[in-house]
Image (tube, rainbow, N blue to C red):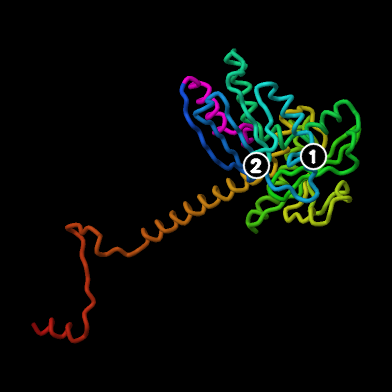
Amino acid sequence: MILLQSHSRFLLQTLLNRVQNLEKAVELDYHWVEFDDVRYHILVSMKNPNALLLSVSLPIPPPEAVFMGGLPFGAIEAIKAAYGVAVQILDPPRDGFNLTLKLNLGKLPPDEEHRYALLVKIASVREVVLGAPLRVVLKHLSSRTVIPGIDGLLAIVHRSKESFFLDPQPDKVTVVFPMRFKDSIDIAFATSFLQEFVEARRTAGLNNAPSCLWSPTPPLELKEAPAEALSANAGFVSFGNAKRLDRTVWNLSTFHAYVSYHVKCSEGFMHTRMRRRVESMIQALDRAKPGVEGRKKSPNSRSFKRLSLKEARANSIS
């Protein structure tokens, strides 16, 4: 199985190219969209080539998700802790975006290894922002404390108008995903995949992995969730405690994309197998056709023609 990378490859490559050519005053104006409807915009002007503006548009949050100033709670603190003085948050952001960062490329670390690590972190701005609430919850779990100001179920946006839920407790955190798909074939594949996913957790080699459960109905942790948030046609997946913070935040934030990716791969694999099977059957039918015209006649071969009664009498008289 393939896990998605936390950083945007196009964003990282753009940052590396710009850092390597700081002496050249070039103008950049790039727009692109990545999975789960996350949009990016990079802007560099000729007047100030050392300044790079990075704007990010997040998925539209559902009503139950907690957003503060257009961002998930804890996002501002997470950005400051991750990027330090190299990045400045512009308020307000550019029109049509939730966040705009100003990167001072002249303040990047002089050491090449540290500079690359910081650029990878900047290219992972999606994880830093969308994963901020989950990171706060897991940090409080490690210290066995309760999050101030958060009482009960917490909804975190991960797709446009869709969220997953956290049930934070001092000694454990339960993460629940309502799984939704539009296509009926995707629903069937996803349901089967998730059931096998849960069964794989029970193998001997995964004893230390977080607990994982699947249910066709909402679990008890979602009893306080709004009814419109519980319309899941592929069931509900629940995860228990996890130990590795960074990997856990990203894997949970992109779990639906991870499942969708493998569902589409499974469909593509089955379509390929079906096409190959049909092609082999067509070849077998072609070989079974009585191709009289294409046969090669040997010197000893004989052919016969059925004659009518009139033709037979004419041949006998002659």
Report x, y in % for residue 84: 70, 22
Residue highlighted by disc 2? 97
Tell me if mark 2 has few (under 14), some (14-19) or many (20+) residues whose alpha carbon lies within 10 angstroms of its own.
some
- Residue 193: which disc? none
In the image, residue 313 above or below residue 202? below
- Secondary structure of the residue carrying numbered label 2: loop
Q: Is residue 3 magenta?
A: yes
Relative horizontal placement of residue 226, taking residue 102 as reference (left or right): right
Relative horizontal placement of residue 93, taking residue 293 as reference (left or right): right
Choose top left, top right, bottom left or bottom right for residue 154.
top right
Q: What type is the residue that disc 2 sits on?
A: Phe
Q: In which quarter of the image is the C terminus?
A: bottom left
Residue at the limit of the structure toward the front, as seen here: 47
Relative horizontal placement of residue 164, taking residue 104 as reference (left or right): right
Choose top left, top right, bottom left or bottom right for residue 82.
top right
Relative horizontal placement of residue 147, taking residue 164 as reference (left or right): right
Q: Give the range drawn in magenta.
A: 1-23
Q: What type is the residue that disc 1 sits on?
A: Phe
Residue highlighted by disc 1? 239
